[in-house]
Image: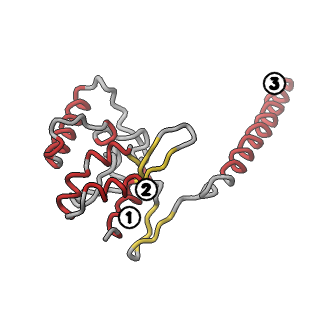
Amino acid sequence: MKNHILSALRLTLVMLVIVGIYLGIVYAGSKVLPTQGNAEIINYKGQKFYANIGQSFTSPKYFHGRPSAVDYNAAGSAGSNKAPSNQEYLKMVQKRIDTLKMQNPDMENIKVPVELVTASGSGLDPDISPEGALYQIKRVSKIRHISIEKLENLIKKQTETSVFGSSKVNVLKLNIALDQLR
């Protein structure tokens, strides 16, 4: 019995050291990032927004982000946990596709970017692909009376490319830049 307790204590100490070293490496690595591991906070029109958490944009004059499985509640980060073969899930996605095509009638025959109709694993993804933004460009152009070329340039300016080559557009930053566009 004494041997088991000593073995368990040794294993616990070894694991504490290993986990402590791991956490130290992760913490130090986060300090190298542009936001130093902290949330990116944007103050706009007297309000505070977190750029790394998805926001709900429903007005047709704005670009819309990914749907949220948790209604954009950062305290309840989660996915839908429904498989692509789940009939209820397929109906929900089809409803989103129908709504998106209704909101963007000029894009009726264009393939819908998947991130505009499916929630992310966290339910809080703040980014869409440049294709997702371009899919919505005609609607925003019509409502705001801004040329498509001007909006395309805005999307290009707001597009970030990762070291792995994938591109993304932060919807909050894009909509703030859109409001500031004259």
Quadrant (top left, top right, bottom left, bottom right) of the N terminus:
top right
In the image, which disc is placed on residue 103?
none
- Taking the image as shown, residue 70 lies to the left or right of residue 9, namely left
Q: Amino acid at mark 2?
A: Lys
149 over 102 or under it: above or below: below
Residue 55 location (% of width, % of height): 36, 56
- Secondary structure beneath label 1: helix
| Mark 1 → mark 2, Cα distance in angstroms | 10 Å
Is the residue marked by circle 2 packed among few (<14), some (14-19), or many (20+) residues within 10 Å? few
Q: Amino acid at mark 3?
A: His
> Label 3, on which residue?
4
Residue 137 location (% of width, % of height): 26, 51
- Taking the image as shown, residue 7 lies to the left or right of residue 165, namely right
Residue sitting nearer the eye, 168 or 51: 168
> Label 1, on which residue?
177
Is the residue marked by circle 3 packed among few (<14), some (14-19), or many (20+) residues within 10 Å? few
- Circle 1/circle 2 CB separation < 8 Å: yes
Residue sitting nearer the eye, 120 or 177: 177
Residue sitting nearer the eye, 3 or 34: 34
Residue 151 location (% of width, % of height): 31, 57
> Label 2, on which residue?
157
- Taking the image as shown, residue 22 lies to the left or right of residue 114, namely right
User: Which residue is pictured at 46% across the width and 61% down the height?
Assistant: 50
Is the residue marked by circle 1 packed among few (<14), some (14-19), or many (20+) residues within 10 Å? some
